[in-house]
Image (tube, rainbow, N blue to C red):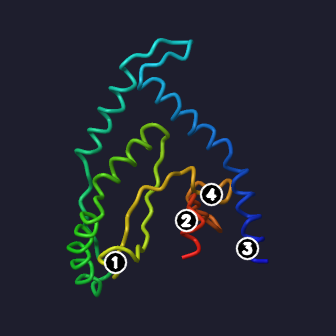
Amino acid sequence: DSVREAYGILQKYKAGKASLEARIIENEEWWRMRHYGKSDGDCVPSAWLFNSIINKHADAMDSLPDVTCLAREESDRNAARLLTEVVPVILEQNRFDATYSDCWYDKLKNGTACYGVFWNCALDGGAGNVDVRRVDILNLFWEPGVSDLQHSKNIFHVELCDNSVLAD
């Protein structure tokens, strides 16, 4: 019953996100047509869009953020210092610079990007570790009308996978 209820909520969220999905797909198709030099009949492809996005992307990569964890109160000072040392190592192990790059292309083409922070049991020889990845916004579903995902009552992250993987 709870799975049926969750599936019903997911379907409602999908319906509420349909126009955003259509716009993202249209943006991606337009970018690919313009990027690869194909004419859509209305206008002749030029290098302007490609150069604009590539230059903005280069600016973003030059501004790759550094990690600084701040203490909320005096007793958190040591934990904040430790996190400031540990988090950059985790990001480096996750090749965060590549994830950051991929997300910036999404931001420039669609106006937004999503990062996912997951626990991956397969990392570090099976011991597990934090896994930071780009999340395709087409695979995320949240409450219609909510602009901050953290305020959605539910969030669904869906992916296609082989049924044999689910059986394991």
Q: Are marks 3 and 2 in contact (CB under 8 Å)?
A: no
Is label 2 or label 1 in front? 2
Q: Secondary structure at mark 1?
A: loop
Q: Position of residue 83 (x, y in %)?
A: 26, 76
In the image, 104: left or right of 168? left
Task: Report the mark closest to the observer, 3 or 2.
Answer: 3
Q: Nearer the viewer, residue 113 or 125?
A: 125
Indicate the quadrant containing the C terminus: top left, top right, bottom left or bottom right: bottom right
In three-dimensional space, the C-alpha distance between marks 4 and 1, rounded to whole angstroms, equals: 32 Å
User: Where's residue 132, x and y in %?
Assistant: 38, 64
Sequence-first disc among 2 and 1: 1
Mark identifier at residue 150: 2
Mark 3 near mark 4, Cβ–Cβ under 8 Å?
A: no
Up/down of 138 relative to 88, above or below: above
Q: Nearer the viewer, residue 5 or 68?
A: 5
Which badge, 4 or 2, is on the more N-terminal residue?
Answer: 4
The residue indicated by pointer 1 is 72
Mark number, residue 3: 3
Query: Looking at the image, is mark 1 or mark 3 nearer the viewer?
Result: 3
Query: What residue sits right under mark 4 in the picture?
Result: 141
